[in-house]
Image: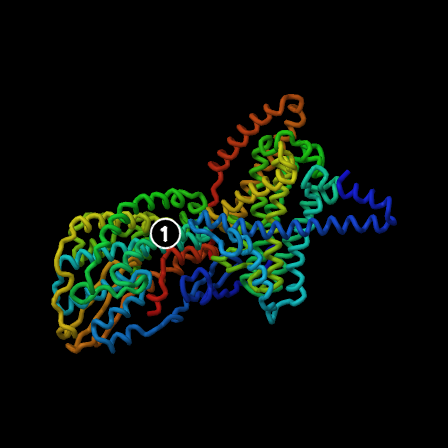
Amino acid sequence: MVIRTEPFILNIGPQHPSTHGVFRMRVTLDGEVIVDVEPVIGYLHRGIEKLGETRTYTQIIPLTDRLDYLASMTNNFAYVLAVEKLAGIEIPERAEYLRIIMAETMRISSHLMAVGFFLNDLGAMMTPVLYMWREREKLLDLYEMVCGQRLTYNYMRIGGLSQDVPEEFMPALKKFVAEMPRFIDEYDQLLSLNEVVLVRTKGVAILPRETAINTAASGPVLRASGVNWDIRKADPYSIYDRFDFEIPVGTVGDNYDRYWVRMQEMRQSVRILEQAIAQLPEGEICAEVPHLVRPPVGEVYGHIEAPKGELGFYLVSDNSIAPYRFRIRPPTLINLTALKDMVVGWKVADLVITFGSIDVCLGEIDR
Amino acid sequence: MTLLEQFQLWLGSIWPGWAAYIVPAIVGIVIVIVFLLAMVIVFIWYERRLIGRFQIRLGPNRLGPEGIFQPIATTVKILLKEDIVPAKGDKVLHWLAPIIVFVPVLMVFAVVPFGERAILTDLNVGIVYVVAISSVSAVGIYTAGWASNNKYGLIAALRAIAQMVSYELPVVLAIVGVVLMAGSLSMTQIVASQNIPFLILQPLGFIIFFLGTVAEMNRSPFDLLEADSEIVAGYHIEYSGVKFAMFFLGEYGHTLAYSCIITTLFLSGWQGPLLPPIVWFLIKVFAVFSVIVWMRATLPRLRVDQLMAFAWKGLLPMAVINLFMVAAEVLWLSEFTPWLLVAVNFVFAGVLVLLWSRLFTLGGGRVEV
């Protein structure tokens, strides 16, 4: 005899420890099995895109800090690159290298948080997070040295950087780069072959290659599904073509691959950092740019490989001091659309870890 | 004769019979409750400090020397909170559930031997009593989840029933192995028969019993009933104030009770050289608890179907094999030196665990909807 059961709707969020912010999911459950997922977004909407149209080009930089607040430097980077492309500004060599250093340390920092909280969602009770915070803390100290801030840096400027790095910065960075591979090995020992991690993540919530491409996913989520697409290689910006590094690509597209790709990307970032430190020239850190930038009439789409995926800025200029249109392509909002394809048929516990494996940041989803 | 019975006899010679019957019982119960509460306070402090060390931080260290008063401050904070009952919840059951969870934990301590004669009642079926009483807690957890009128609570309640029922079986089968070798169901007799701790004589039984009890007391990696990252706090999501404190106490009391039972069944209880029995007992209890905390700090959580598979495909068959093995040894090998059994059982346990880890996988789990 089979007892007749009914599916029921469970609200996960907006207040829930594993939604990484104020995010809500309307989940239809059949017992523990997920029948349907409907993300409800907008709890953190601040109207950044509309605000941008009322500010000068330089004043928008602090707004971009508030997008993906775990990777503010790369948000700055993507925005200033778009404006420079629109206005046709050349920037000094030293600024280029420092930007790369900031972007790659930011990638390590963001991935540390992503992997740590992914393990936290798996139920590892804060231990991996606290180990990863130990390293992230050193990076935050570095950022505090260069701009006085630990979360919203507002460090990059149109034409370069706001200020040069202080003299204690480079020794600290070199020490970090020298130590980091050992710490990543330590995480690998603790996590990558952990039996419980393997049974919980291997083969779970597979995102097939075609689905990943069709949903326009990007970043580690796309690469875990076996697509070799990294904007640093596919459409090189800044000076990434001068560095020697590899793109780690997953095979299956399950939760373990998304975790694994991030671990490998941290190693590659360390490689880029080593080369950038060795090649770093002396000189100016900002080009001669007028206080009020007035780009020529036109439009531009600039995109970079942010830690979470393709971060793009679309700007329309009418030759005034503020953009006519300011539009953001946030990576995690697009990646989130693949969530339902991944989790239907799996259990509630898998929903939570899959959501963690996408590595969302609500500041970016709601803007 | 236990210390309490001796006290009762002495009292009977100077007081009327009914008083000599009631007063020692009350004295014994008060001592056990005070012991439980004091140990829970120490356990909370110890766990927080130890997890702090595992997580490269200090843990609470402000209140008192090494932060020993922090659990007291936490308790005061919890007790002062407003007691909230969900508007559409079942008020009576909501009130009853914490009691159903906590009281069985207290009752288990009636048969825990703290020393050779320091035991509240030396029941001749002590271990059966422990198994019977401690499974009542599952009813309380289910009641709490149901009465809260909360979907997270309901999921936790359903998980509770499945988990508790599944893990009861391997645990009991592992206990039967111990009973066969000890030749008695009484807790004091089980301790007295362990000249060599059963941990060494029955390593497989110990592994099964330990993992099963960790699952029964809902500690990581089997803490699916609470699972803060999935169902927030599970069955006690709608509890606050004194009722929540009861759950908290019940949970730590459960851990303490099972640490005591593991010590009694497998680590030769209060036996040990030089130091007094109660000190040996506490050292062993803390050793067991440290391993549990270590697991909690290290391992991620299993999924619900994997948890079930682990009980039914992993622990239960191994427990059955272990039971037959022990029975055969008791029947045919009891006249040989016990160290022969130690050697045989270690090899046997190693082979069986390796075999199981090759044969069974816990993965999979997708359902077509």
Q: Nearer the viewer, residue A66 or A240?
A: A66
> Residue A299 at x, y = what percent?
17, 71
Q: Nearer the viewer, residue B356 or A75?
A: A75
Q: Nearer the viewer, residue B251 or A15?
A: B251
Res A162 → quadrant: bottom left
**Residue at the image position 60 percent from the left and 59 percent from the top:** B245
Q: How would you rate the neighbour count of disc 1 (Cα within 10 Å): few for under 14, some for 14-19, many for 20 or more? A: some
Coloration of the structure image:
rainbow
> Residue B200 at x, y = what percent?
58, 31
Q: Is residue A115 above or below residue B264?
A: below
The amino acid type, in three-letter code, at marker 1 is: Arg
Res A323 → quadrant: bottom left
Disc tally is: 1
Quadrant, the N terminus of chain B: top right
Q: Is residue B173 visible?
A: no
**Chain that bears disc 1:** A
Q: Secondary structure at mark 1?
A: helix
> Residue B352 at x, y = what percent?
52, 33
> Residue A344 at x, y = what percent?
43, 58
**Residue at the image position 34 percent from the left and 43 percent from the top:** A185
**Residue matched to label 1:** A134
B191 with respect to B237 (left or right) = right
Residue sticking out furthest to the front: B65
**Residue at the image position 62 percent from the left and 38 percent from the top:** B280
Q: Is residue A55 above or below residue B176?
A: below
Residue sticking out furthest to the right: B16
Q: Nearer the viewer, residue A294 or A198?
A: A294
